[in-house]
Image (spheres, rainbow, N blue to C red):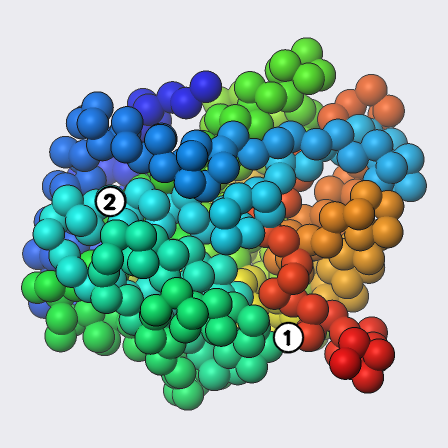
Amino acid sequence: MYNLDITHAPDEGGHFGKFGGRFAAETLMQPLKDIEEAFYEAWADEDFHAERLDLLKNYVGRATPLYHAKQLTAAVGGAQIYLKREDLTHTGAHKINNTIGQGLLARRMGKKRVIAETGAGQHGVATATVAAMFGMQCDIYMGREDMARQMPNVLRMRLLGANVIPVDSGTATLKDAVNEALRNWVATCEDTFYIFGTAAGPHPYPLLVRQFHTVIGQEARAQCLDQAGRLPDVAVACVGGGSNAMGLLHPFRDDASVRLVAVEAAGYGLESGQHAASLAKGKAGILHGNLTFLLEDDEGQVQGTHSISAGLDYPGVGPELAYMFEQGRLELDASTDEDAMEALQLLTRKEGIIPALESSHAIAAGARIAKSMAADQIVLINLSGRGDKDMNTVFKHLGWVEDAS
């Protein structure tokens, strides 16, 4: 089921077309090159893959199911909707695929401490989980705003033994957590491995994260052929930085018959100025070590973002997604906060599955797309995470806070 070939690799400088690269402090250039070298050595090592795939199967719970959501399909009308159930992994989201891989790299390189940034907290939980399993010190940087709206994940990280470090700068969200983690890594890179959480950042991180997540799309591709006898017509994933999107979409990249759709967070609306739609509304610039599409003002300052989902509340996007969009291989869609909340309730009531708010953006867009298609067509949606972490936000939005208590 799993193809270990590295296809559509970046050039030696880490570029996908003009996007990507390695724009980092001089202190970090050698550590980044060391990680790149260690990754390529590990990727060519059968023992590395044997251990990684064993952990993905027996610890993470892969392969995750591909579920034909018949009740949702009937409610929406149009194409058949299939859900890739990443919410059923250990820790409840796709993030564990990447932290297993990077954790093994960190151990291979002899690092005793790992750090990470986190927004929704799922990457933080997944990093803390792997650190506990491998016996590593773990520090997680998280914006104070995100800590408030994702407190269940903060408690999970602390229970796992991680030190959760609040970040108060800027908007106190994901962008600022990345900034603080990078600052710490500059000072501690000799004994610390930075487990980056999305398919962005300086080279080689976009490649690493993509490769560790392609298990999602490779499984979904084989499962769709097995269950439906054909490939999907459309594959849909939400996009913040791009980890779950690259994981699902990359294995379908060379299948011309499959439309690839990235769903961004439209927040209060794409024309409101309060959103996180970097591809739809951004322009090329450098953010967190790579050239990509980002939201910035006329003076080149990174703009604040808004999304009801902490994991999508980010002003940039991974460079490979930017390249795929520029090349015309990636279609864009966007879901507002209200769209996501409605989709969360629809899936919950129709299928008994509570999705993460991030995933709800993809559900909303996937349902819209399916409605315009024929009943014998297939829409594949990546259900990237479960929604228990978002209950406080959901209950407040619905006015159920008193009832929930």
As helix, strand or loop, the secondary structure at mark 1 comes to loop
Q: Nearer the viewer, residue 178 or 71?
A: 71
Q: Which amino acid, by three-letter code, is at mark 2? A: Leu
Give above or below for 397 relative to 290: below
Given residues 332 and 211, the one toward you in this image is 211
Q: What x and y, as percent, mark residue 262?
A: 59, 46
When the figure is inspected, residue 369 is found, relative to residue 393, above or below; the finding is above
The residue under the point 42% across, 40% down is: 59
Residue annotated with mark 1: 274
Q: CA distance from mark 1 to mark 2?
A: 38 Å
Residue at x-position 65% and y-position 62%: 388
Query: Percent x, y for residue 70?
Result: 84, 32
At numbered mark 2, what does the secondary structure look like: helix, strand or loop? helix
Relative to residue 395, is residue 85 depicted above or below?
above
The residue that disc 2 covers is 104
Q: Residue furthest bottom?
A: 168
User: Is residue 157 left or right of 382 when viewed as pictured?
Assistant: left
Point out residue 60 in the picture as x, y percentages from the top left corner: 45, 41
Looking at marks 1 and 2 on the same chain, the residue that comes earlier in the sequence is marked by: 2
Image quarter where the N terminus lies is: top left
Residue 201 in view: no
- Give the image location of residue 37, x and y in percent: 12, 41
Q: Relative to residue 150, is residue 283 drawn left or right?
A: left
